[in-house]
Image (cartoon, helix red, strand yellow):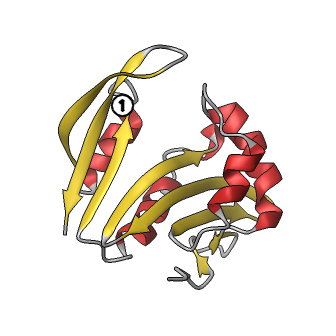
Amino acid sequence: MGIKIETKVMSKDDTKELKVMSENDIEEIFYLEKQLFEDPWSMSILTNCLTYSTYFCLVAREENQIIGYLISQIVCGEGEIHRIGVLPSYRRRGIANCLMEEFINQNCETYLLEVRPSNEGAVSLYKRWGFEVIDTRKNYYHNPLEDAWIMCKHS
């Protein structure tokens, strides 16, 4: 399948760009995972995401630093976000929005994701992109224990 994008400049000052994730990014993303999530993914999980052509993984950079990333999978016209993270100091600057835009531009029939209902920022972002809550997974998340909302968007 080979999902690819061209490097894109994300800001008028040309300091932020969006790129396809590479093996060289894994160590830094692993470090960010530990900062951003209570249940960070391992190096091996992150590395495996780059070995399958169905994964669509992006990084947002400013100069030499990863400031955000998106890990998703696209199979049979269905796109699913597995991870999206932005450094706290870069939130509310449009980074997650740029990552979402590129994901939505993959022209899937359906887009899915799970989110903690308490993650108001993420829920708000997804609703702005047209996602709606379609179901709940009871006790899906740990650390702390919480349900997950399944959100969906149809093209």
Q: Quadrant of the C terminus?
A: bottom left
Q: Position of residue 49 (x, y in %)?
A: 63, 59
| Residue name at image x 71 percent, y 42 percent | 32
Nearer to me, 30 or 52: 52
Q: Position of residue 39 (x, y in %)?
A: 61, 28
29 lies left or right of 52: right
Q: Position of residue 106 (x, y in %)?
A: 38, 76
Most extreme residue toward the top is 144
Residue under the image location 35 percent in, 68 percent down? 104
Residue 149 figure quarter: top left
Q: Which residue is mark 1?
A: 120
Vertical placement of 123 versus 82: above or below? above
**Callout 1: few (<14), some (14-19), or many (20+) C-alpha neighbours within 10 Å?**
few
Q: Residue at x 31, y 48 (%)?
A: 126
Count the marks: how many?
1
Amino acid identity at mark 1: Glu
Q: Nearer the viewer, residue 33 or 48?
A: 48
Residue in the picture at 50% in, 70% down: 54
Q: Is residue 128 above or below residue 133?
A: below
Above or below, 80 against 145 in this view is below
Residue 109 locus on image (x, y percent): 23, 71
The quadrant in which residue 24 appears is bottom right
In this rendering, position of residue 43 left or right of residue 54: right
On the image, which quarter does residue 65 sit in? bottom right
In the rendered structure, the answer to whether residue 48 lies left or right of residue 71 reads: right
The secondary structure type at the circle numbered 1 is: helix
153 relative to 107, above or below = above
